[in-house]
Amino acid sequence: MNTQTETQTTESVILEMLTENTGISMMDSGEDSGRAWQQNQAKGVEALRAQPAAWLKWGQPVISTFHFLNEQLTYAPVLDLSLRGFMQKSENSYLEDISNWLDFLGVPQGEDKGFYEDSRFSLNTYNDQYCLLSQGLQYVCFTLNKKDYVALQVHGGADIRGGYTAPRVFEADRESLVFDSQSVALRCNNCALLLSFRGYDVDEHEPPKENVEAWAKKLNEEIQNLKNWDFDKAGCPNCGVDSWAA
């Protein structure tokens, strides 16, 4: 086995993917440094490690792609080396390579019976209206020798039709990979109000630790629907401070 592959960790592979040069286009927004991979390179891996697990951006919840993947995945070096070797002389697209590689491994195509029954399940998170990840993902989940894996690509570019990293292979639970990217709980750092988001809407909440009665009164008399609260302009619906932690 390749020595470098042997010594790599889940975190190191994810960091490589998040900083991988996936190219630029004259049509990109952000001029010559606007792509996610460029911003990640400029910040450096320590900044990626130090970023919060989730935050509010323009009043909407965002989950750190780095922390999410590092929690969800376990690097699979043998299969990863197999796929990279398979792709080495190929001129096909990455998705075609993944499909052909899975055929080579004998992974059944599946019978299109849905998320839980397919031998293979593919998703681009751009098409998932509830996904809260800070960067898009494109992946194929598959089962081999009774274990679940994912051949994963990270979107490092501007136009969702291109700008994806080369695929890498990890062990992953497909259910968690999909559904855990759709919800997050954020607590106000000032008053400890806890808000649980599903997609971009507040799904439920836990009252602040102090002045619970005042919060209940405000919720009933002033705030008609937390789903319509303007977090970007008004901050925490209880105390008005805009500081949150996952």
Image (cartoon, rainbow, N blue to C red):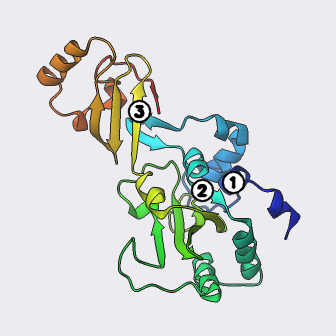
First in sequence, mark 2 or 3: give its number: 2
| Residue marked by disc 3 | 186
Labels 3 and 1 touching (C-beta < 8 A): no
Residue 143, quarter of the rendered image: bottom right
Labels 2 and 1 touching (C-beta < 8 A): yes
Q: Quick one: 119 or 191, which is closer to the camera? A: 119
**Residue 157, visible in the rendered structure:** yes
Q: Quick one: 230 or 26, which is closer to the camera? A: 230
Q: Which mark is residue 73?
A: 2
First in sequence, mark 2 or 1: give its number: 1
Residue 71 screen position, x and y as percent: 57, 48
Q: Looking at numbered disc 2 in the image, what kind of residue is underneath it?
A: Leu
Left/right of residue 240 with respect to residue 9 in the rendered view: left
**Between marks 3 and 1, how big is the CA–CA gap?**
26 Å
Secondary structure at badge 3 equals: strand
**Between marks 2 and 3, how big is the CA–CA gap?**
23 Å
Left/right of residue 229 with respect to residue 9 in the rendered view: left
Count how many numbered circles sit on residues in the image.
3
Q: In the displayed image of the protein, which residue is found farthest to the right?
A: 3
Q: Looking at numbered disc 3 in the image, what kind of residue is underneath it?
A: Leu
Residue 108 screen position, x and y as percent: 52, 86
Residue 111 screen position, x and y as percent: 40, 86
| Residue marked by disc 1 | 10
Dot 3 alpha-carbon crowd within 10 angstroms: few under 14, some 14 to 19, many 20 or more: many
